[in-house]
Amino acid sequence: MATCSTPEALGTALSHTGYLPDTGINTAAFLADTLARPLFLEGEAGVGKTSLASALAQARGSELIRLQCYEGVDASQALYDWDFPRQLLHLRTIEAVGDRTIDVAAAESELYDERFLLARPLLRALRTPNSVLLIDEIDRADDEFEAFLLEVLSDFSVSIPELGQIKADVAPLVVLTSNRTREVHDALKRRCFYHWVQHPSLEREVAILRRRLPEVTERLAGDVAHAASRLRAAELIKPPGVAESLDWASALQALGCEQLDHGFAALTLGSVLKYREDIERVELEGLSQLIAS
């Protein structure tokens, strides 16, 4: 595993993966890794929280294991489950053999052997040394799952009744993300190193566009970054993040644009705005202000 002795060294390693961090992100990620604390990233959608976890895994030479949260996610979907079809097939195979000398109790105990265990993301992370565990959009999960997660992260161990306790030899670097659709409980936040990920500065966004989309001209990257910044300042339902800026620049480049003009801006608004009301508002207020230099 590659290690970084300073926040600056980590920032350089992240840059080599294609992710362009700022000083705050470098420091937060470095301290979370050094102090063995989960990193809690909060911010609007599309600002690069998930991308940071992926970049950290690349920079560390670690496996990225992702748990996507959603309403109703529970322990069996996050931790482990038993492969019921294979267990049933195992029993039917024993029945087909028809060997009366087979110990029934032993055969039943075999059903809960490792070969029938389905390791979900949390268990995989505990068993994978130096992995990066991304718990994405924790704000979409419910309170019960938060409480379960808090218990797992307290000592990085779980108890499986049929197999006993499983504890991580080397704890994973845990990255939790939240779009703040609801407040995450303080008990979980207290265990983490917290960092608010904000929209990048204009200069940094241009650099991100040029790094991720080298075929896009410098003029077009600057135009898109300026326009996206103006859209974020407007009172929209869903202001665009960096992900939308990248989509917009890609769409414009695919149409052969070397700079943003009124016509192509109108044709490609669907790349950067995802609500009909937002598109109508921008069109109503006029695109000339959006693409003004």
Image (cartoon, rainbow, N blue to C red):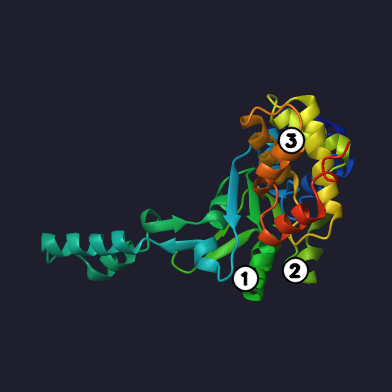
| Identity, as a three-letter code, of the amino acid under mark 1 | Phe
Distance (Cα) linking label 2 and label 3:
27 Å
Whole-percent x, y for residue 194 in the image: 82, 56
**Tag nearer the camera, 2 or 3:** 3
Q: Which residue is mark 2?
A: 184
Label of residue 19 in the image: 3
Asked if residue 152 can be seen in this view, the reply is yes
Q: Amino acid at mark 3?
A: Tyr
Q: Nearer the viewer, mark 1 or mark 3?
A: 3
Element at badge 3?
A: loop
What secondary structure is marked by label 1?
helix
Q: Nearer the viewer, residue 281 or 201?
A: 281
Residue 207 falls in image quadrant: top right
Q: Residue at x 30, y 62 (%)?
A: 85
User: Disc 1 marks which residue?
Assistant: 145
Neighbour tally class for label 1: few under 14, some 14-19, many 20 plus, Cα within 10 Å: some
Q: How many marks?
A: 3
Quarter of the picture holding the C terminus: top right
**Residue at 77% in and 45% down:** 33
The spot of residue 96 in percent (x, y) is: 12, 61
- Residue 68 at what x, y percent from top left? 59, 57
Kind of element beneath mark 2: loop
Q: Nearer the viewer, residue 148 or 66?
A: 66
